[in-house]
Image (tube, coloured by chain):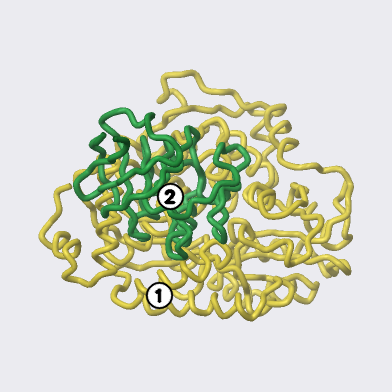
Chain colours: A green, B yellow
Amino acid sequence: MRVPCRPLSGGRAEGPALVTETPLSFFGGVDPETGEVVDGASDLHGRRLGGRVLCFPKPKGSTAGWVILYRLVRNGIGPVAIVNHESDPVVASGAIVAEIPLVDTPEGPLDAIETGDRVTVDADAGFVEFGG
Amino acid sequence: MDLTEQESAMHGGEEGPAVAKAMELLVTLGELYGATELVDITCAHGGLAGIEVNGVEGVELLETFAETAEARVPATYNPLTFDHRYAEALGADPEGMALQRRIEAAYDRLGYREGGTCTPYEAGNLPAYGEHIAWAESSALTYANSVIGARTNRESPISAIAAAVTGKTPYYGLQLAENRVPEVAFELTAAARDRLTTTDRYSALGYYVGTRAENRVPIVGGLPDLDPPALKLLGAAMATYGSVSLFHAAGLTPEAREHGHTVDAVEAPPTTIDEEGLEAAHRDLGPSAGRSVDTVVLGCPQYAADQLETVASQLAGASVAPGVDLFVCASGAVRERAERSGAVEAIEAAGGMVTETCTCPMAFDRIGTESMATDSTKAVFYAGGTSDAEPAFGSLEACIEAATTGAWPD
């Protein structure tokens, strides 16, 4: 299934999804040394972002979050792509300098995507692809 | 977005890869916010400076920018983590100092003004009323919008750098007059106004307004005539506890005076702030019961020269108690001014440290802090995140007494 999205940071990547329905903050919410989610309020607590297509509704938290995302990707332990319902300048800035694809504003439902599913994010063409 | 020929050229890589990346960032941010064009800025402030948050990766990114780009407008960066004068007291390790030197060198190559600060308006980066600027650092940008009447959005460290190296910012939000009008109103009672005699009370007021205003534009009526240090603290607290980027003080701040904004500009009736409300806000901010103190932090936002003189005169020849660290933060430019008046010497003779750093990324665990005291709500907020010690919050006088006795006064 292919769902058109708005591209915010270009590129194309695929990987196993890591999905949450709660907002995520990179600054204070993710350990920059390990890529592990440390936010106790997140249902991803304890999970690692490395190699994942990270799907979360919207970001929260400090503007310093951009550099946490950047550091993770630079060290090979960050997400390979990000899908938001409604992104923000903090995540967009981080994704752009880290050069990973980021899309938001999906034109169809993405709730069929479950953690572990293979997902492709093509921010150049502007879509997310998953399922059979 | 409609780009001019010059902007398209920058975006297309004609001015190097760093400028192209910066333009990509600005254009994307503009689109996120519904801007259809960019606007020229007169100055920029902010950019990564702390070593803990940014790491070696952030430093390398900054260095990459510095290879092919430079600031096209006057630009200043955020305060640093360490001051070499007090390296040991600040818990500076050689690796951290070396990383910090790389940051300073990169900003130098980028053509930024020397020395990091959160009070650029007191360090030679002073815009004028109505100018379009791009400032990050929540207390500085709130001051620029509210006390100066310049126009900036709530930039992030990297979008501020992108603005500096292109001289542009997307035209949205607080760049437009129509988005700068009061949205939520507060009115002080006469009794509450009369209580605003010490800086911690301004801080508490800022906390009160900020938590309720959130990210809207508040107008506060009934304030006494305020000097810049008070307005600095007021705005910083609002920016920290809400995410206020612009506030109006009826009859006092330049935009409020120019447009005649009063609390009646807002349709909903104002929230009344009385003495009880102020006291409750103050209590919320920190325990004031007698307790031992080992670290006193002043200058968040960084102090101006006359504030350093106040600290010197408050110390009045007394000494900082053994086992206590007194940090008074101020920019390099302000320190130079205060050196001429003898204030720095007086503070150092007492055993205090006038440091060009930021309290917020202070590694309290490295410093060995167990019990902190401060006159700044912003420091209270950030210390809470980095140390286990719940800070004592109160007036400058109380903080000085804590520094010289090692105990928070009753």
Mark toward the viewer: 2 or 1 = 2
Asked if labels 1 and 2 touch by Cβ distance under 8 angstroms, the answer is: no
Task: Give the Cα separation between the discs numbered 2 and 1.
Answer: 29 Å
Numbered disc 2: secondary structure: loop
Chain letter behind tag 2: A
Which amino acid lies under the numbered mark 2 shown in the image of this protein?
A: Arg
Mark 1 crowd level (few <14, some 14–19, many ≥20, 10 Å Cα): some
Mark 2 crowd level (few <14, some 14–19, many ≥20, 10 Å Cα): many
Per the image, the residue denoted by label 1 is B63
Per the image, the residue denoted by label 2 is A52
- Do badges 2 and 1 share one subunit? no
Tell me the quarter of the image containing the N terminus of chain A: top left
Query: In the image, A93: left or right of B39?
Result: right
Q: Position of residue B382 (x, y in %)?
A: 64, 51
Which amino acid lies under the numbered mark 1 shown in the image of this protein?
A: Glu
Whether residue B149 is visible here, answered yes or no, is: no
Whether residue A39 is visible here, answered yes or no, is: yes
Residue at 33 percent across and 61 percent down: it is: B162
Q: Which residue is at the front of the view, B220 or A14?
A: A14
Numbered disc 1: secondary structure: helix
